[in-house]
Amino acid sequence: MSFRLSSFYPEKRGWINSWTIFYWAWWISWSPFVGVFIARISKGRTIREFISVVLLVPTILSILWFTSFGTLSTSVQEAGFDLTGFATEEVLFATFSHYNLGKILYLVALVLIVSFFITSADSATFVLAMLSEKGNLNPSNKKKIVWGALLALIAISQLFSGGLTALENTIIIVA
């Protein structure tokens, strides 16, 4: 990112500045959940298991996701179809509509996105329930359900009130 600072072109810095702040805020707001959750699921594992399961596998899967779907989007854009008119959350599916196996790719992407949100929500509710019970490593299901319902209601209300932008702004404010 240091090579894209546009020091001499302040009008080109908007995206770089806003994305950096959002990205930092995202990780600041999620770091307690991620840290506690990873510590909890890593208990009793070897260092080799920790490195492979927590660091290598997610990194490899992320590289595969971004290279494959990023390449598809770049190819569609270079073929003359303007994807910049779509909202951020629509670009992936707009890309798929230009391919023969687009419907199958829709399903694959939806399964992956849903599994990401479910595991993220599960870890967040687990950690919040642990913290609500003063660090209890096995929080009650009742607390997990309450936190899960609260998080779901907050996320749904944010999405309906202003879409992804409202959710991003809330994350920045909370962080």
Image: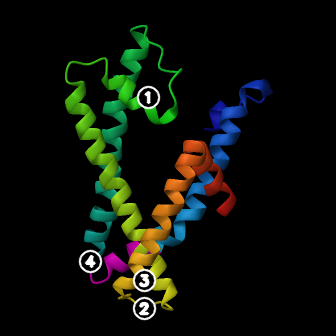
Residue behind mark 3: 143
Residue behind mark 1: 91
Label 4 packing within 10 angstroms: few (<14), some (14-19), many (20+): few
Tally of numbered discs: 4
Residue behind mark 4: 46
Residue placed at 33% from the left, 64% from the top? 54
| Number of the front mark, 3 or 2 | 3
Q: Earlier in the sequence, mark 3 or mark 2?
A: 2
Q: Tell me where residue 38 sits by quadrant.
A: bottom left
Q: Residue 60, relative to residue 35: is it above or below?
A: above
Residue 87 appears in the picture as rendered: yes
- In terms of secondary structure, where does tag 4 sit? loop
Q: CA distance from mark 3 to mark 2?
A: 11 Å
Q: Is 62 inside the magenta-drawn segment?
A: no
Q: Earlier in the sequence, mark 4 or mark 2?
A: 4
| Number of the front mark, 3 or 1 | 3
